[in-house]
Amino acid sequence: MSGAGSGGGRHYDFDLQLRLLPGGWSRAWIWLSGEAGPRVFELTHAGENPWREMARAAAEIAAGADRASFVWCGEPGRDELRLTVVPERRNRLVLSCWDDEACAWTAEVATSHWLALVYAELLKVALLLEQKHFRAERDVDFPADELIRLRVSLAARRAVT
């Protein structure tokens, strides 16, 4: 594996944080093992909801798919994040970020770690949206259906393992 974040770091040296901003924008931070700071993504919610796509991809992986991907769009630019289960170690996946058909970085992470991060961050935002003051400034189509689908896939995955 090549690229930033692919060095000999442990899977738990990987983190994700999501923040829903007013005005149809959000921000995502991904911390990769061995890097001083996070990768920052400024995301627009115009068009496809970036969190819906991420939740859908996570649910597919949780349900046993070997690969899934999602696109995060900013203005300008877009990043495609690809999730690929490591065939000889199904409890691991490679997350790679592609910008204009070139791989910007890759990271290997425990599948359960990635799924827990995605679920926890989406659940955090869902709970914040229940707060009137938070919801008042944010006009977003929150992917509650995909959060439920991910929760069901995670429960089924735990029942099998």
Image (cartoon, helix red, strand yellow):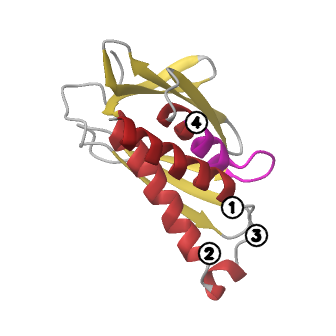
Q: Position of residue 141 (x, y in %)?
A: 75, 61
Q: Mark 3 sits on what residue?
A: 139
Residue farthest to the right? 47
Q: Mark 2 sits on what residue?
A: 129
* 141 with respect to 41 (left or right): right
- Spatial CA span between label 2 and label 4: 22 Å
- The amino acid at mark 1 is Phe
Local secondary structure at mark 1: loop
- Spatial CA span between label 3 and label 2: 10 Å
Q: Residues within 10 Å of mark 4 (few under 14, many from 20)?
A: many
Q: Earlier in the sequence, mark 4 or mark 3?
A: 4
Q: Position of residue 24 (x, y in %)?
A: 73, 62
- Spatial CA span between label 1 and label 3: 9 Å
Check contact, mark 3 vs mark 2: CB within 8 A: no
Front-lying residue, 46 or 75 = 46
Vertical relation: 121 (above or below) 130 = above
